[in-house]
Amino acid sequence: MRKRTALVGVLAITVSLTGCARGIDTDDSGSTALVEEFFAHLEAGEATKAAALTTIDFPEEFIDDDFYRASDALPTDARIVETRGYDSGGFRATVEYTFDGAEAPGTLELSVSREDGELRITGWRGDTPITIGGIESAATVTVNDQLEYPLAEDSAELQLLPGAYGVRYEDPTGLTKLLGTEDAFTAYVPDLGGDEGRADFSFSPAFTADVEPGLAAAVEGLQATCAAERFVGPSCPTELTASLPGPLGEAVTAQWFREPGPVITLTDGEYHATSTFRVRFSDDELPITTVSYTGVLTRDPAGAIAFTPEPSSSSPQTSAR
């Protein structure tokens, strides 16, 4: 009988402890409603109201309603396709949505937490700022026809809401274009290509296909004129004129062997090019000399590549026709 009494006592204790345990709060209705409200504001172009539902510190220019509504497209037809967690202990929602004109839908995973007693969206995959600038380019990038970023200046950070932003690349020199895309394109934030952790704001400027051939043709014209000046005239590189005692005879010719290059750099908004050569004369008694042409690359009014040598290099502007 004692064993039976002890067993009953254990059971009584177990029942008592179970009765005191609190159930897990599985309510997620508040978080779900918050995510739905966030996307409703985005679809309506209400950037300020959407941003107010988050804990992200957006600079004012990126959550201006007029700026956001100027996007190529806004998220529409948003629907929650998966959830994890609860209002009480952290919540995640995966949302699918579409953009007018886009071939693929967008997907975004958002996090919700309680901050100071209030449910707030604390972030999403791909919410890190986008960096633009800090490269050698005379071009500017304009977003939604409103915010302009010179690429040569220090990098700027763009903290953007999900959207399809209009991006335009403009180089006033006309010497560069974007590789692999048009100079005006739509950037999806986050990317629609399957990696929701990054924004589709990547681009690579490159010189147009006629720049190097045009520069080469312009320099060849200077070299031909230099030969006609008997290698000591204003069209000749200063290294060459400094190495010769005076004009060479009519029978003397030269071969110009191109060194690796050209080297093109950006200075004060202009592209400066340097082409280097080793010059060998038909007269073996003359020294082999390394020379360079340095000058400014532009386009002339007819659209041809123009090269204006710097005063210390040689003389007047030459265009490639």
Image: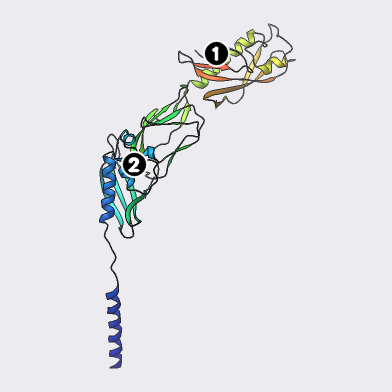
- Looking at the image, which is closer to me, 15 or 96? 15
- The picture quadrant where one finds residue 91 is bottom left
Local packing at callout 2 (Cα closer than 10 Å; few below 14, some 14-19, many 20+) is many
Q: Are marks 1 and 2 in contact (CB under 8 Å)?
A: no
- Looking at the image, which is closer to me, 308 or 19? 19
Q: Is residue 242 found left or right of 318 in the rendered image?
A: right
Looking at the picture, which amino acid does disc 2 mark? Pro
Label 1 – label 2 distance at C-alpha: 49 Å
The image shows residue 201 at horizontal and vertical percentages of: 40, 36
**Looking at the image, is 148 positioned above or below residue 210?**
below
Q: Residue at x 58, y 12 (%)?
A: 316
Q: How many badges with numbers are in the image?
A: 2
- The picture quadrant where one finds residue 249 is top right
- The picture quadrant where one finds residue 168 is top left
Residue 318's disc is: 1
Residue 82's disc is: none
Q: In which quarter of the image is the N terminus?
A: bottom left
Residue named by callout 2: 162
Q: Residue at x 40, y 27 (%)?
A: 183
Q: Which residue is drawn at 30% across and 77% down?
A: 17
- Looking at the image, which is closer to me, 156 or 248? 156
**Looking at the image, is 22 positioned above or below residue 142?**
below
- Looking at the image, which is closer to me, 146 or 109? 146
Looking at the picture, which amino acid does disc 1 mark? Thr
The image shows residue 254 at horizontal and vertical percentages of: 66, 14
The image shows residue 315 at horizontal and vertical percentages of: 60, 13
Label 2: element kind: loop
